[in-house]
Image: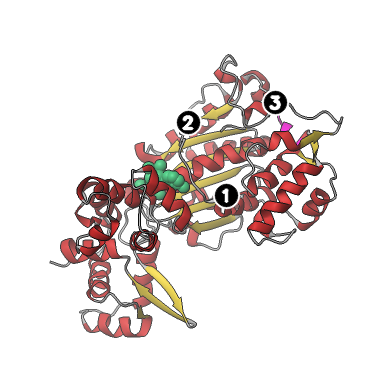
């Protein structure tokens, strides 16, 4: 699954001396064979895409060169093939010297096991061998980081929606366009200074003296400007927990401007940050930052997940209802699929007929407990109002119900915004009207555990 087979492997010394400035992958010029162009054409027609569709993840001018069979950067060409899910694209590439790439040089090949592991900066990236769909999301983030040159992209969403799995996929997909990838989980939640020192030591391959965070930050930006590195900060919500959605915990307050700084200051690297909660520094009007709430897994991809969990023969309409009930959340779908397989003879309809949903499941409860642990009293109150009614409600009606229950007036919009940052609210647009509701699993959890 890795792209590293096509990449020149370098030593740490070469890396830290700046040999990689400019990006080696970008230097290789390649074009697609006629058969390759035809295959891409066939697949894009099947998807209903135009020849210059944005979903290819590159500019119309680049696509023009592709269709004309002209030379392109190899990484760009690979991106076009992968956009239409051609994984064996190496057979369709012709290098500028007319030599067709052999499968041994295919970037899909696994890294050579005898290559010393320290030759390429690929640090801490987890492996998710099973991954379905999300091509559009991969292309969108690729475009933001590689073409539009946003420096920070935040992937947001409810626990289990697939932020980490998608980011691991992105790391592999983007690897040819970066000189290295450093992945850090925020679960251990170090102090800001320790976090910066760890990043700098990984980049410099030598010990870094403790210094004030501001100086460490300046050094980091300078490194990220010398080299094009992809940094991943996974599980940023660990640092959050103030009294409104997106606020930092007191002990991590100094992280509060890190993402905004990485977005605003000039460097040539990219940062992907995943979080269940939208951090307050992303809501500032920062340049260089994009954020993205992960949509549900698409139905056909969700079906593959159900299949893999042992639901092999199912009623399609029932399976569609199940996927919608859990809002295409891959974690919830895997949990519920196992339950249906073991306790309902694999019959989705039987499961749907009973009225408990996953809020009872221990694993899902943990996710919901974590997702709601920092709620303040007014947020709880609003969730309880929303949980009373399965029908979506508009802001004005919600405001009336909400403010009549409060001792001190507080803006409905502010509380809604805070809950949205915590990924606890469904926002639906119907006939031009914005409506709010809770997804079923959240509604049941709120009714049972927050409003008793
Ligand atoms: N596209 C996918 N195809 C197959 N499995 C997936 C996909 N996305 C997620 N999964 C699986 O669903 C589960 C939850 O995914 P993941 O851990 O990425 O969610 P998350 O949004 O990062 O959750 P959290 O907020 O708890 O960190 C994992 O078992 C993962 O392997
Ligand atoms: Mg995660």
Q: Which mark is residue 124?
A: 2
- Which of disc 3 and disc 2 is earlier in sequence? 3
- Helix, strand or loop at label 2? It is loop
Residue 381: x and y, percent? 23, 71
Residue 437: x and y, percent? 33, 72
Label total for image: 3
- Can you tell which of label 1 and label 3 is closer to the viewer? 3
Reply yes or no: does residue 59 show up in magenta: no
For image coordinates 32% across by 82% down, the residue present is 399
Q: Is residue 321 left or right of residue 406?
A: right
Which of the two residues, 443 or 201, is positioned nearer the viewer here?
Answer: 443
Q: Is residue 285 above or below residue 180?
A: below
- Which of disc 2 and disc 1 is earlier in sequence? 2
Q: Which residue is mark 3?
A: 105
- Helix, strand or loop at label 1? It is helix
Residue 346: x and y, percent? 27, 50
Which residues lie in the magenta part? 19-26
For the N terminus, give its image quadrant: top right
- Can you tell which of label 1 and label 2 is closer to the viewer? 1
Q: Which mark is residue 138?
A: 1
Q: Which mark is residue 275?
A: none
- Helix, strand or loop at label 3? It is helix
Crowd band around label 2 with a 10 angstrom C-alpha radius: few (<14), some (14–19), many (20+): few
- Which of disc 3 and disc 1 is earlier in sequence? 3
For the C terminus, give its image quadrant: bottom left
Which of the two residues, 98 or 182, is positioned nearer the viewer here?
Answer: 98
Reply yes or no: does residue 21 show up in magenta: yes
For image coordinates 68% across by 21% down, the residue present is 14
Q: Is residue 235 visible?
A: no
Q: Quadrant of residue 19?
A: top right
């Amino acid at each position: 699954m890795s792209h590293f087979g096509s990449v020149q492997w370098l030593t740490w010394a070469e890396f830290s001396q700046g040999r990689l400035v400019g990006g080696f992958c970008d230097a290789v010029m390649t074009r697609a064979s006629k058969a390759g162009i035809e295959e891409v054409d066939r697949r894009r027609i099947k998807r209903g895409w135009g020849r210059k569709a944005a979903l290819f993840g590159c500019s119309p001018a680049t696509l023009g060169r592709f269709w004309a069979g002209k030379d392109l950067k190899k990484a760009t060409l690979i991106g076009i093939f992968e956009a239409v899910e051609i994984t064996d694209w190496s057979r369709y590439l012709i290098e500028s010297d007319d030599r067709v790439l052999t499968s041994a040089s295919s970037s899909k090949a696994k890294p050579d096991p005898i290559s010393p592991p320290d030759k390429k900066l690929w640090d801490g990236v987890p492996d998710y061998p099973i991954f379905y769909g999300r091509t559009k999301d991969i292309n969108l983030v690729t475009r933001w980081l590689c073409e539009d040159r946003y420096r920070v992209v935040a992937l947001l969403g409810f626990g289990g929606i697939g932020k980490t799995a998608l980011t691991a996929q992105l790391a592999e997909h983007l690897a040819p366009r970066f000189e290295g990838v450093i992945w850090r989980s925020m679960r251990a939640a170090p102090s800001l200074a320790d976090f910066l020192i760890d990043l700098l030591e990984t980049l410099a391959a030598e010990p870094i003296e403790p210094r004030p965070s501001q100086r460490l930050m300046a050094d980091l930006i300078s490194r990220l400007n010398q080299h094009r590195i992809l940094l991943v900060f996974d599980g940023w919500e660990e640092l959050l927990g103030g009294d409104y959605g997106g606020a930092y915990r007191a002990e991590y307050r100094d992280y509060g401007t890190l993402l905004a700084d990485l977005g605003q200051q000039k460097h040539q690297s990219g940062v992907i940050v995943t979080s269940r909660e939208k951090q307050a520094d992303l809501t500032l009007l920062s340049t260089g930052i994009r954020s993205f709430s992960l949509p549900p897994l698409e139905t056909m991809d969700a079906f593959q997940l159900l299949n893999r969990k042992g639901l092999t023969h199912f009623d399609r309409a029932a399976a569609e209802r199940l996927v919608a009930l859990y809002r295409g959340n891959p974690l919830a779908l895997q949990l519920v699929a196992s339950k249906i397989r073991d306790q309902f003879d694999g019959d989705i309809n039987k499961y749907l007929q009973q009225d408990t949903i996953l809020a009872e499941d221990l694993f899902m409860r943990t996710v919901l407990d974590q997702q709601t642990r920092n709620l303040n009293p007014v947020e709880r109150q609003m969730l309880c109002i929303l949980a009373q009614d399965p029908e979506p409600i508009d802001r004005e009606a919600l405001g009336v119900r909400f403010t009549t229950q409060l001792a001190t007036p507080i803006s409905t919009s502010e509380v809604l915004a805070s809950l949205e940052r915590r990924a606890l609210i469904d926002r639906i647009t119907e006939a031009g009207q914005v409506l709010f509701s809770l997804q079923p699993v959240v509604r049941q959890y709120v009714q049972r555990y927050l409003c008793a």
